[in-house]
Amino acid sequence: MTITGENIMDAKLQNANIAVLDAESHLEARNIHVWFKDRHVLSDVSLHFPTNSVTALIGPSGCGKSTFLRTLNRMHELIPGAGLAGSIYLDNEDIYAAGVDPVNIRLRVGMVFQKPNPFPTMTIKGNVLAGLRLSNRRTRDEDDLVESCLNRASIWNEVKDRLDAPAGSLSGGQQQRLCIARSLALSPEVLLMDEPCSALDPGSTRRIEETIRELSADMTVVIVTHNMQQAQRVSDQTAFFLAEEGQPGHVVEFGATDNLFSAPNDPRTEDYVNGRFG
Ligand SMILES: Nc1ncnc2c1ncn2[C@@H]1O[C@H](COP(=O)(O)OP(=O)(O)OP(=O)(O)O)[C@@H](O)[C@H]1O
Ligand SMILES: [Mg+2]
């Protein structure tokens, strides 16, 4: 990938409203800029994610939320033409430093996508264990691990009697929770979720939101959502991204979710969270 360090000098730096939460950062993005070929799509994003917090990333389509999310576990560099400047620190270690294995970072920082992507012909149990097998890891008691991951993803009761059925036989909401269980089997420290409920019915959405709250007891969660109620229900802090006409996406405001929704500092945030645009 191209690290376009010089370009950072040319980039128009934005003044974001950043309210710092008083907690130690587990994951931190410092001055992140992203390019696709010569197109600057994200400018100077600095956000910190305290241990065991849930952070919502909100903003109109195309402002760079998914792109930013992918910089947090080094999936961005898999995209042809992707450029990056800035640093991401995980437990104070720069994940882009020379010698750091990106595969190891992706194991520590797991990801759940918008569209559930289980292996459809593989069994439910096989799906939970798939990441473990692909990364050549072992567990002492597979059945125990499968049960605990499915439990934490709030789907155990629905599938415990058919663990050998193909994952493709599950509903969309169940498949999404199975994908969460598959991520959990790798014991990630951070879970990135890109609109995990956008294809789901209200009942499944509610269950996943409960799951997110429970997971945050022992991991750091970053979730992209277009659902303002969801951001308020699940997150501790929220970052509002915006790409103004012809400009790269940037963070307009970042702070405690309650404040950002009830008393935003920036009129653009107020308009967005009240549904006036986007
Ligand atoms: N693989 C890619 N190649 C080139 N440009 C890309 C690529 N992926 C994203 N972009 C561009 O980067 C910008 C940010 O896209 P991104 O998908 O991150 O937005 P988003 O905020 O997640 O939008 P949405 O809410 O619709 O998912 C857009 O202008 C998009 O066209
Ligand atoms: Mg997106």
Image (cartoon, rainbow, N blue to C red):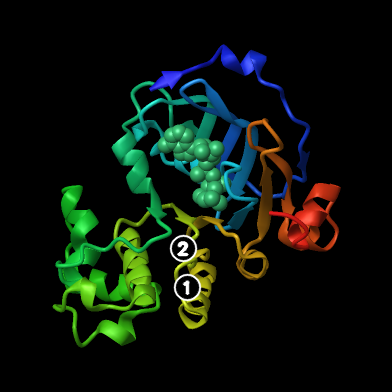
Q: Are marks 1 and 2 in contact (CB under 8 Å)?
A: yes
Q: At 40% across and 25% down in the image, what residue appears?
A: 81
Relative to 233, residue 41 above or below: above
Dot 1 or dot 2, earlier in sequence: 2
Q: At 71% across and 22% down in the image, what residue appears?
A: 12
Q: At 57% across and 44% down in the image, what residue appears?
A: 62
Q: Secondary structure at mark 1?
A: helix
Q: Residue furthest top?
A: 6
Say which amino acid is labelled 1: Ile
User: Can residue 141 be seen from the camera position used here?
Assistant: no
- The reply to whether the residue tagged 2 has its Cβ within 8 angstroms of ligand 2 is no
Badge 2: residue crowd in 10 Å (few <14, some 14–19, many ≥20): many
- The percent position of residue 177, horizontal first and vertical second, equals 37, 71
Relative to 155, residue 256 above or below: above
Give the Cα separation between the discs numbered 1 and 2.
Answer: 8 Å
* Foreground of the two, 39 or 193: 39
Q: Is residue 38 left or right of residue 275?
A: left
- The percent position of residue 119, horizontal first and vertical second, equals 21, 62
Mark closer to the observer (1, 2) = 2
Say which amino acid is labelled 2: Pro
* Foreground of the two, 136 or 80: 80
Viewport quadrant of the N terminus: top left
* Tally of marks: 2
Badge 1: residue crowd in 10 Å (few <14, some 14–19, many ≥20): many
The residue wearing badge 1 is 208
Q: Which mark is residue 196?
A: 2
Q: Is residue 235 left or right of residue 159?
A: right
Viewport quadrant of the C terminus: bottom right
- The percent position of residue 142, horizontal first and vertical second, equals 17, 68
Q: Which mark is residue 156?
A: none
